[in-house]
Amino acid sequence: MEEYSTFGRHVAMDAWGVDFGLLNDATTLEKHMKDAAEKSGATVLSSQAKVFDPQGATVLVLLSESHISIHTYPEKGFAALDCYTCGYDVDPMVAIQYMLTVLKPTQAFEKVMRRGDGPIEVVKPVSPVKKRLVHQ
């Protein structure tokens, strides 16, 4: 396992080319976000979902280990995902990768950061996710 701070790991992912209907369905996104959290080993404490007018959704899942969230822009086919977890037992990348299998973007870009060790350190810079990871 890559060395990380005791305070946590933070993964930010931008996903493009995602289906409008999925990005506008807060109920389905909330279910998948909870599944993603559980697959990563996290403990779900609560969740909230909001649909915006005329479109878009935000889902926030509060974890014992921190949080996972998604903010969507269906008209652009775009979703911004974010997962921050404390300690070593939960891997936020597992949650983000699960959401990629759900969203099936045509492009995705990630940033993996180490938190709590002074300045935020990017341990994996923004790069396109390989096509094999993005299910089409």
Image (spheres, rainbow, N blue to C red):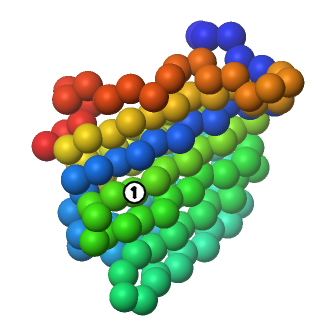
Q: Quadrant of the C terminus?
A: top left
Element type at mark 1: strand
Q: Residue at x 40, y 75 (%)?
A: 56
Name the residue type under label 1.
Ala
Lateral position of residue 91 relative to residue 121, left or right: left
Q: Residue at x 25, y 57 (%)?
A: 18
Q: Is residue 64 above or below residue 94?
A: below
Q: Which residue is mark 1?
A: 79
Q: Give the camera-side residue of 16 and 49.
A: 16
Q: Position of residue 82 (x, y in %)?
A: 55, 48
Q: Residue at x 41, y 65 (%)?
A: 72
Q: Is residue 117 above or below residue 84?
A: above
Q: Is residue 83 visible?
A: yes
Mark 1 neighbour class, 10 Å CA radius: few under 14, some 14 to 19, many 20 or more? many
Lateral position of residue 84 relative to residue 132, left or right: right
Q: Is residue 10 above or below residue 18?
A: above
Q: Position of residue 50 (x, y in %)?
A: 53, 79
Q: Quadrant of the N terminus?
A: top right
